[in-house]
């Protein structure tokens, strides 16, 4: 599993760790039931404080992606749909209710102004 940190991003390190792990879970690099490295080990590899890793693990636990157990470590619960995926599914359902085809929805998205 690869987590990259960039102190120059201006984003807290624990958030960068959580983002990297979240992406690894979503991308299937880490499977449900797999145990993550102990916080102390992950911290040593990344060159950060152990509490930084624990904070990242806590964020992912709050999101329902990890289960933390004392003396057992962090275990991946599974991949949960992201908020964006949820919104896409809702968009498709709403389009269906309004009789708008997927192709028309895709065209609307393509024509929407970029953020």
Image: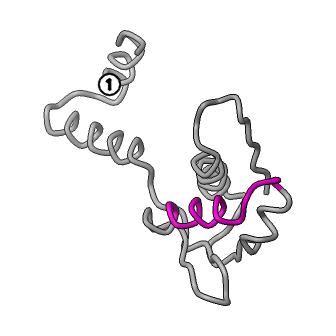
Residue at the (77%, 71%) spot, across then down = 40
Label 1 secondary element: helix
Q: Is residue 6 positioned above or below 53 on the image?
A: above
Numbered range of the magenta stretch: 46-60
* Mark 1 residue crowding within 10 angstroms, few (<14) / some (14–19) / many (20+): some
Q: Main secondary structure of the magenta part?
A: helix
Question: Residue 71: where, in percent of width, then height?
Answer: 67, 90
Question: Residue 45: where, in percent of width, then height?
Answer: 85, 59
Q: Is residue 88 positioned above or below 17 on the image?
A: above
Residue with the mark numbered 1: 105
Where residue 30 sits, quadrant-wise, is bottom right
Residue at the (22%, 27%) spot, across then down = 100
Outermost residue to the bottom:
71
Tell which of 94 and 85 is nearer to you. Answer: 85
Tell which of 88 and 52 is nearer to you. Answer: 52
Residue at the (56%, 62%) spot, across then down = 55
Outermost residue to the left:
98
Question: Residue 53: where, in percent of width, then height?
Answer: 66, 62
Where residue 39 sits, quadrant-wise, is bottom right
Where residue 84 sits, quadrant-wise, is top left
């Amino acid at each position: 599993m690869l987590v990259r940190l960039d102190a120059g991003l201006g984003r807290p390190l624990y958030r960068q760790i959580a983002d990297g792990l979240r992406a690894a879970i979503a991308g299937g690099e880490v499977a449900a039931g797999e145990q993550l490295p102990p916080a102390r080990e992950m911290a040593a590899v990344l060159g950060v404080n152990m509490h930084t890793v624990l904070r990242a693990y806590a964020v992912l636990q709050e999101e329902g992606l990890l289960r933390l157990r004392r003396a057992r470590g962090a275990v991946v619960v599974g991949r949960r749909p992201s908020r964006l995926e949820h919104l896409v599914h809702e968009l498709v359902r709403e389009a269906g209710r309004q009789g708008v085809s997927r192709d028309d929805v895709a065209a609307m998205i393509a024509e929407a102004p970029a953020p």
